[in-house]
């Protein structure tokens, strides 16, 4: 299985890929405001690469529960100065975390390699056609509703069946818009329109997504469901996130999006070393 775009290619099986989160927003739930200055953002990106990030995921709009959308021009003003420099300076692919066709297209023109899209539940194919035209990578995430409403009593018949079915249907829509399967990574959307029980069910049955025959991305970094499980603040959720990541990696998940790159890389590389050392019982 291969994941590729115009400027990159990864062949699976391989060591798990780690996407380093770089939010250039004033209001993201964990690191909002820390990297609004382009110089600080670029410095942070270089640090994440040094810690082992395989891709840098730049976001200019908060998608925390209850967040208000921002205008296209504002999101572009936040991300363009950063992605311009990152695409020149980094040796790893840069991803843009956006739902907006105009933002995706501008960033792809600047050299971004991947569109990370929480809005794959849309019906308008404009963004998909942009991805197809640029032959970029594409991460499609499941979300029920939108960030402003997604945590208002989310309901499913069966959350695992429903999310798998949604992503399976999206693969058909993507191909109709000109996106090839090799361009696509799938994300079950932990924390996006899911209750605590929904999130835990998706994680417990994360291996079900292997049936879709595409790489799977997991994003659990510092999320609120960990706070509910553990009773801890955002800054204390790393051990829980690492447990989820190792669990998911042991069940076939290939990509992990995180604020905490170095510990995530260590945990995944350790699991991989242990897995490679397992000898068959005579």
Image: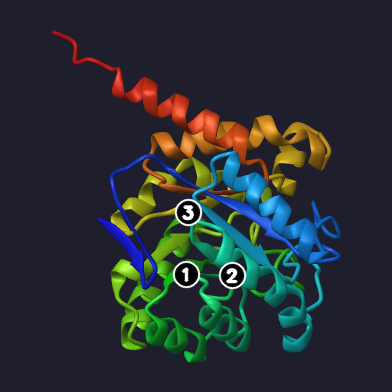
Q: How is the image coloured?
A: rainbow
> Circle 2: is it few (<14), some (14-19), or many (20+) Cα within 10 Å?
many
Quadrant housing the N terminus: bottom left
Which quadrant is the C terminus positioned in? top left
Q: Residue at x 77, y 65 (%)?
A: 38
Q: Secondary structure at mark 3?
A: strand
Query: Which residue corresponds to mark 3?
Result: 217
Residue 123 % position (x, y): 51, 88
Q: Is residue 263 visible?
A: yes
Mark toward the start of the polypeptide (2 vs 1): 2
Q: What residue is drawn where x is 37% and y is 82%?
A: 173
Rate crowding at label 1 as few (under 14), some (14 to 19) or many (20 or more) other CA atoms within 10 Å: many
- Answer above or below: position of 103 versus 225: below
Query: Do the numbered discs 2 and 1 sit on residues whose CB atoms are within 8 Å?
Result: no
Residue 150 at x, y percent in the picture: 70, 68
97 shown above or below 44 = below
Q: Which mark is residue 113?
A: 1
Q: Residue furthest top?
A: 282
Q: Dot 1: what SS?
A: loop
Q: Is residue 199 left or right of residue 138?
A: right
Q: CA distance from mark 1 to mark 3?
A: 16 Å
* Tag 2 secondary structure: strand
Q: Is residue 272 left or right of residue 69?
A: left
Q: Nearer the viewer, mark 3 or mark 2?
A: 2
Check disc 3: other Cα within 10 Å, few if <14, some if 14-19, many if 20+: many
Question: Could you tell me residue 273's position as x and y percent?
Answer: 38, 23
Asked if residue 155 shows in the view, the reply is no
Badge count: 3
Question: Badge 2 is on which residue?
Answer: 96
User: Which sits earlier in the primary sequence, circle 1 or circle 3?
Assistant: 1
| Image position of 31 with respect to 169: above or below | above
Give the alpha-carbon distance from disc 3 to disc 2, as whole Å. Answer: 15 Å
């Amino acid at each position: 299985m291969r994941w590729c775009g115009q400027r990159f290619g990864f062949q699976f099986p391989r060591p798990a890929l780690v996407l380093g989160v770089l939010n250039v927003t004033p209001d993201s739930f964990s690191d909002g405001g820390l990297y609004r200055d382009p110089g600080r953002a670029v410095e942070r990106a270089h640090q994440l690469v040094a810690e082992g990030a395989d891709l840098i995921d730049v976001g200019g709009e908060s998608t925390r529960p209850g967040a208000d959308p921002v205008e296209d021009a504002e999101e572009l003003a936040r991300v363009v100065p950063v992605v311009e420099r990152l695409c020149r300076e980094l040796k790893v692919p840069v991803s843009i975390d956006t739902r907006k066709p105009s933002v995706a297209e501008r960033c792809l023109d600047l050299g971004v390699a991947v569109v990370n899209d929480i809005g794959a539940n849309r019906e308008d194919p404009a963004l998909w056609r942009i991805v197809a035209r640029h032959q970029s990578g594409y991460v499609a995430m499941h979300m029920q509703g939108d960030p402003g409403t997604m945590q208002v009593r989310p309901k499913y018949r069966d959350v695992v069946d429903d999310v798998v079915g949604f992503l399976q249907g999206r693969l058909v829509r993507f191909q109709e818009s000109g996106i090839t399967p090799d361009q696509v990574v799938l994300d079950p959307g932990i924390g996006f329109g899911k209750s605590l029980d929904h999130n835990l069910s998706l994680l417990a049955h994360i291996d079900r997504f292997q049936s879709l025959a595409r790489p799977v991305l997991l994003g659990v970094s510092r999320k609120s469901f960990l706070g509910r499980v553990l009773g801890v603040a955002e800054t204390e959720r790393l051990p829980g996130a690492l447990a989820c990541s190792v669990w998911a990696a042991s069940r076939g998940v290939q990509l992990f999006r995180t604020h905490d790159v170095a510990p995530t890389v260590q945990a995944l590389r350790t699991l991989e070393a242990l897995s490679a050392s397992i000898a068959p019982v005579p």
